[in-house]
């Protein structure tokens, strides 16, 4: 024990350390306080002096500006006096004397005539203030040397203008600089401080050193800072080499600089006194702190010796050592607690030592019984621990592999280098803790193990052991491989489908696409939504269907989309819920197929069916179509009328169920034979329940029967008697869908059927006996013009005796409604061959005309689309050729000039190679849009002739106007500043243009000659590019940019 204490005596004791640290701490605190106090006071003093200087300068600047304004006002008072301006010298001298008496600042005030000479004969015409006075301006001069006494002065001058505003002289007032200097001395700071003025060149106006013949100049850097408006933040040496703090401000309209300075020694004098007193106070405080620190250290160190003795005993294994209570009672509360803690620690160490032995045995049992593989290695990779699971997996016992290298014993040769690198990374950086490799068992079988590794470190951070916990995942990987193969087979199967299968997660984001893509370039990226894949209208519909699918509602949508080339495609998509193995909804799956051809077929079928229905509905015969089982498939309006049935009473029901009266009749028998023999049949039969004779035509087909009921009752009755025939004819006239009117030879309407009443919107009494030339009949031709009575179809038939067929016009009914009519007029003759009446058949063609109009509009729109270039939106080559030919022919008849501009984008292939085809397309669009917007007259047009070449047709335009337009287009295209890095003539896109013009001859060459001439000019322009070449009288002339003579000599 004494040896230990002797050894520790040679080291610094706690008492010594506490005293040393306390002394150092007190010194550092004292020094820091002194330093902080000094810095804070310096900053405070600087801020105070800068603020004081700035206020002083501001006051001086305001004072000087006010003083100079007042002196200038005194001079203006004299110059602007009416009597002075009129040339009254006595009044001038009186005012001068008055100003001098009231303001002693002026050294001299005098009137100088227009020649620039004072009363004393001094010439001042070379002074700048005299020049300003001649210009009618008042001014204040810079510092000048008086030509009277050589003193430095400044001059206030104001012009005297006569009654006619002519220059009569100038009032001049001079002030000595000593006057201004007295003003400046009113504001100073300390022994070394001063305020003074300098001009723009830095020459002293006031201040020490300004009174000599060669005034002092201050340093130029200070002027530069003042000109830049930079505030001074640090002290500097003034022109007297005295360290000062300064501030400045401009005055006299920015011509003079006021500088205020305070000596740094004067500013910091009070600071030095304050710092001395502060240091003295801090030293006294430090001495007191050291005294109390020494006393405290002594009291702390005494009980520590007892604790040190106990710690050393425990260190040597004496865990039963305890500090006696009598020792603790004499110490402070803190050391009493520390001694009690030491005794408790000794008890705890004793308990833990016993428990640690038990725990070691327990941990060994857990390692051996764990299902995971647990192996412990030393830093050289030798096996230190090997649990039971490792023995079962490898077939080795722990005794067989103890202290053996894991590389040589268990790792296949091909994987050893990887494992060495992994262990090295684990030992050096601690990285790569998860790892997979194979173990080779005693029998040679390879097992794939997934490891989670860590290291065991000593308290100093040195790595002692490597611990690995592994799981045999050999079977798991086999299952995963089988799953991947299954998924790949599924993808191949789905990929061969015509349909496109897509999957979305619960957030409606794309997770997979299978099958053939629907005409798109490339597959969509995962994570995209329908709003990123479709146009907004389609996206909203499909998103609603997706949300319904998430609610377990299957939805089928028919939708359309348009390719970039304008082609329409139709698709059908179904949406349903996507579930996991437990049946929970995890997303949405959709199946899409293209139905464009199906839709087109359906549309064609509907169009054909509609056309057939229109035909069948327009005929006056009853027509029905029966299926093979004799159920109704179709019935036209005339048949429903004849059968006195509604459509819902007929469609889908058996022929004899609807018409039981035809059971076992000849018509029924003919229907049976037509189906049986597949041969057409015709029969003429009286149908009692319809009370009419019908000629029935039955035509079989693979789908059933088509039956026409042609009413031949009239013919039958005509055969019986003429009277009955006349009555039947009247009935037919009343029932036909056309309006029938008969006009007698006097122009009176003698008969009108029911349809005529409907069409005219009038009753029969209002029609019959009214003349066809009555004012009520208001007709308009197809152009909307009122038709005169002599042009009425009835008038023509009546006057010429010829039939008028298919005459179309518009009739305005009395109720204001307008309808389109087609009229057929047949004149009827008496025995002498004279016209005695006219039979008029009228048809309402309003609906047909509307359909024809819509069809014509659609055809015009289609024609327009076929004439436009798909990329640029301007006319294409086809329209160019057709329209140029038409313009050629019209100009040949009118003998007017026809001009053509052919243009080409310079180095367009290089542009495409540099910026890609998308960039080239954008360039073509921009150029085409610019050209089209520049063609103001409606008969001019531009067309894409091919590639990057355009043609501009200018009807009725002479060649000089065409040349000017070409040059304007060339300049405007270049001014667009579309970047072209590989152009050899400009940094931007440019064009070359060829201009040709001709007055076409009626029997001369065709329009191709004009195109050829313009092409030759274009070829000439492309020799150097970015220019215009114009066809001359006989040759192609080169056109220079901007100021070229466009149309030659």
Image (spheres, grey):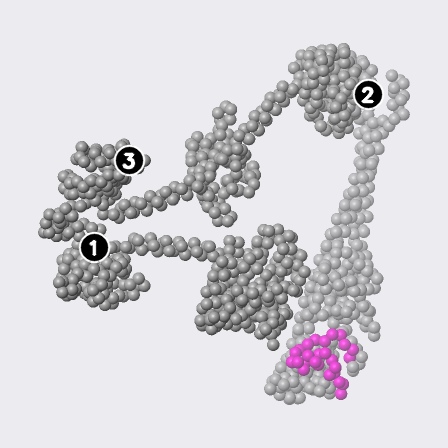
Is residue 966 in view? no
Image quadrant containing the N terminus:
top right
Q: Quadrant of residue 58?
A: bottom right
Q: Quadrant of residue 228?
A: bottom right
Q: Residues within 10 Å of mark 2 (few under 14, many from 20)?
A: few
Whole-percent x, y for residue 1025 in the image: 64, 64
Pick whichever of labels 3 and 2 is earlier in the sequence: 2
Q: Which mark is residue 739?
A: 1
* Secondary structure state at the residue bearing disc 1: strand
Who is closer to the viewer here, 271 or 627? 627
Q: Nearer the viewer, mark 3 or mark 2?
A: 3
Is residue 567 in view? yes
Can you say whether 159 is above or below 34 in the image? below
The residue identified by callout 2 is: 308
Whole-percent x, y for residue 841 in the image: 21, 56
The residue identified by callout 3 is: 678
Q: Residues within 10 Å of mark 1 (few under 14, many from 20)?
A: many
- For image coordinates 78% across by 79% down, the residue present is 146
Pick whichever of labels 3 and 1 is earlier in the sequence: 3
- For image coordinates 14% across by 60% down, the residue present is 750
Q: Quadrant of residue 76?
A: bottom right
Q: Residues within 10 Å of mark 3 (few under 14, many from 20)?
A: some
Q: Which mark is residue 257?
A: none
> What is the spatial separation of the Cα atoms under label 3 and label 2, in whole angstroms?
128 Å
- For image coordinates 51% across by 42% down, the residue present is 519
- Report whether 769 appears left or right of 483: left
Image quadrant containing the C terminus:
bottom right
* Secondary structure state at the residue bearing disc 2: helix
Report the span colored magenta. 121-146
Image marks 3 and 1: residues in contact by CB distance under 8 Å: no
Who is closer to the viewer here, 209 or 880? 880
């Amino acid at each position: 024990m004494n040896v230990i204490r002797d050894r520790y005596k040679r080291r610094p004791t706690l008492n010594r350390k506490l005293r040393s640290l306390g002394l150092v701490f007190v010194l550092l605190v004292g020094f820091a306080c002194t330093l902080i106090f000094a810095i804070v006071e310096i900053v405070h003093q600087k801020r105070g002096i800068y603020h004081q200087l700035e206020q002083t300068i501001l006051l001086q600047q305001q004072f000087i500006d006010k003083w100079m304004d007042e002196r200038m006002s005194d001079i203006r008072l004299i110059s602007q006096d009416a009597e002075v301006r009129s040339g009254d010298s006595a009044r001038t001298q009186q005012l001068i004397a008055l100003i001098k008496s009231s303001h002693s600042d002026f050294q001299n005030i005098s009137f100088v005539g227009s020649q620039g000479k004072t009363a004393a004969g001094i010439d001042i015409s070379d002074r700048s203030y005299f020049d300003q006075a001649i210009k009618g301006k008042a001014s204040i001069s810079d510092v000048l040397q008086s030509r009277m006494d050589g003193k430095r002065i400044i001059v206030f001058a104001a012009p005297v203008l006569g009654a006619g505003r002519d220059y009569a002289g100038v009032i001049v007032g001079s002030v000595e600089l000593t006057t201004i200097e007295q003003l400046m001395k009113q504001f100073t700071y300390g022994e070394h401080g001063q305020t003074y003025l300098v001009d723009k060149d830095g020459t002293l106006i006031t201040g020490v050193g300004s009174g000599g013949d060669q005034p002092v100049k201050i340093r130029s850097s200070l002027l530069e800072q003042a000109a830049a408006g930079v505030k001074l933040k640090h002290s500097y040496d003034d022109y007297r080499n005295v360290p000062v703090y300064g501030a400045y401000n401009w005055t006299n309209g920015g011509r003079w600089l006021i500088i205020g300075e305070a000596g740094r020694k004067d500013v910091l004098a009070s600071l030095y006194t304050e710092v001395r007193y502060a240091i003295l106070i801090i030293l006294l405080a430090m001495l007191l702190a050291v005294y109390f620190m020494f006393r405290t250290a002594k009291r702390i160190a005494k009980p520590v010796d007892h604790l040190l003795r106990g710690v050393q005993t425990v260190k040597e294994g004496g865990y039963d050592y305890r500090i006696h209570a009598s020792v603790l009672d004499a110490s402070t509360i803190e050391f009493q607690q520390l001694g009690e803690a030491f005794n408790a620690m000794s008890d705890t160490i004793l308990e833990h030592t016993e428990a640690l032995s038990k725990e070691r045995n327990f941990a060994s049992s857990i390692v051996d019984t764990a299902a995971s593989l647990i192996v412990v290695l030393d830093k050289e990779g030798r096996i230190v621990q090997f649990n039971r699971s490792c023995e079962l997996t490898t077939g080795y016992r722990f005794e067989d592999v103890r202290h053996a290298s894991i590389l040589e014993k268990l790792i296949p040769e091909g994987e050893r280098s990887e494992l060495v690198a992994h262990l090295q990374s684990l030992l050096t950086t601690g990285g790569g803790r998860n790892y997979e490799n194979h173990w080779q068992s005693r029998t040679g079988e390879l097992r794939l193990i997934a490891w989670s590794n860590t290291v065991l470190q000593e308290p100093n951070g040195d790595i002692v052991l490597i611990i690995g916990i592994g799981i045999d995942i050999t079977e798991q990987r086999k299952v995963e491989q089988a799953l991947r193969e299954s998924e790949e087979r599924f993808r191949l199967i789905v990929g061969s489908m015509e349909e496109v299968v897509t999957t979305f997660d619960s957030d409606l984001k794309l997770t997979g696409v299978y099958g053939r893509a629907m005409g798109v370039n490339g597959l969509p990226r995962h994570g995209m939504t329908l709003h990123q894949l479709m146009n907004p209208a389609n996206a909203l519909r499909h998103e609603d269907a997706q949300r319904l699918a998430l609610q377990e509602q299957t939805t089928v949508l028919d939708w359309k989309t348009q390719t970039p080339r304008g082609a329409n495609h139709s698709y059908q998509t179904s949406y349903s819920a996507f579930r996991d193995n437990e049946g929970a909804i995890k997303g949405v799956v959709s199946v899409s197929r293209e139905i464009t051809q199906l839709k087109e077929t359906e549309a064609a079928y509907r169009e054909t069916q509609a056309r057939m229905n229109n035909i069948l509905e327009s005929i006056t015969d009853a027509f029905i179509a029966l299926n093979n089982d004799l159920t109704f498939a179709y019935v036209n309006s005339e048949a429903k009328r004849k059968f006195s049935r509604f459509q819902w009473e007929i469609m889908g029901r058996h022929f004899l169920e609807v018409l039981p009266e035809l059971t076992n009749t000849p018509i029924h028998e003919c229907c049976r034979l037509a189906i049986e023999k597949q041969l057409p049949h015709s029969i003429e039969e009286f149908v009692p329940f319809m009370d009419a004779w019908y000629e029935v035509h039955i035509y079989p087909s693979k789908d059933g029967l088509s039956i026409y009921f042609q009413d031949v009752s009239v013919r039958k009755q005509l055969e019986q008697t003429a009277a009955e025939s006349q009555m039947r004819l009247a009935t037919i006239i009343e029932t036909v869908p056309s309006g029938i009117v008969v006009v007698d030879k006097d122009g009176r309407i003698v008969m009108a059927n029911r349809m005529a009443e409907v069409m005219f919107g009038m009753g029969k009494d209002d029609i019959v006996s009214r003349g066809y030339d009555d004012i009520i009949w208001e007709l308009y031709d197809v152009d909307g013009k009122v038709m005169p009575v002599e042009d009425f179809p009835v008038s023509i038939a009546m006057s010429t005796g010829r039939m008028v067929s298919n005459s179309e016009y518009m009739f305005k009914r009395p109720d204001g409604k307008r309808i389109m009519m087609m009229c057929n007029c047949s004149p009827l003759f008496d025995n002498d061959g004279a016209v005695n009446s006219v039979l008029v058949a009228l048809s309402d063609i309003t609906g047909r005309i509307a359909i024809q109009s819509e069809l014509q509009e659609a055809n015009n729109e289609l024609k327009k689309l076929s004439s436009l270039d798909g990329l640029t939106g301007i006319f294409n080559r086809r329209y160019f050729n057709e329209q140029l030919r038409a313009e050629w022919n019209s100009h040949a008849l009118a003998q007017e000039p026809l001009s053509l501009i052919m243009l080409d984008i310079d180095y367009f292939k290089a542009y495409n190679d540099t910026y890609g085809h998308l960039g080239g397309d954008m360039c073509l669009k921009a150029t085409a849009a610019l050209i089209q917007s520049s063609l103001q007259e409606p008969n001019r047009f531009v067309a894409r002739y091919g590639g990057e070449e355009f043609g501009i047709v200018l009807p009725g335009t002479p060649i000089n106007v065409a040349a000017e337009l070409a040059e304007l287009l060339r300049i405007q295209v270049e001014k667009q500043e579309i970047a072209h890095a590989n152009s050899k003539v400009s940094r931007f896109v440019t064009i070359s243009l060829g201009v040709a013009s001709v007055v076409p001859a009626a029997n001369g060459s065709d329009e191709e000659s004009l195109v050829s001439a313009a092409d030759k000019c274009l070829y000439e322009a492309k020799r150097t590019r970015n220019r215009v070449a114009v066809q001359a009288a006989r040759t192609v002339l080169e056109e220079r940019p901007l100021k070229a003579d466009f149309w030659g000599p």
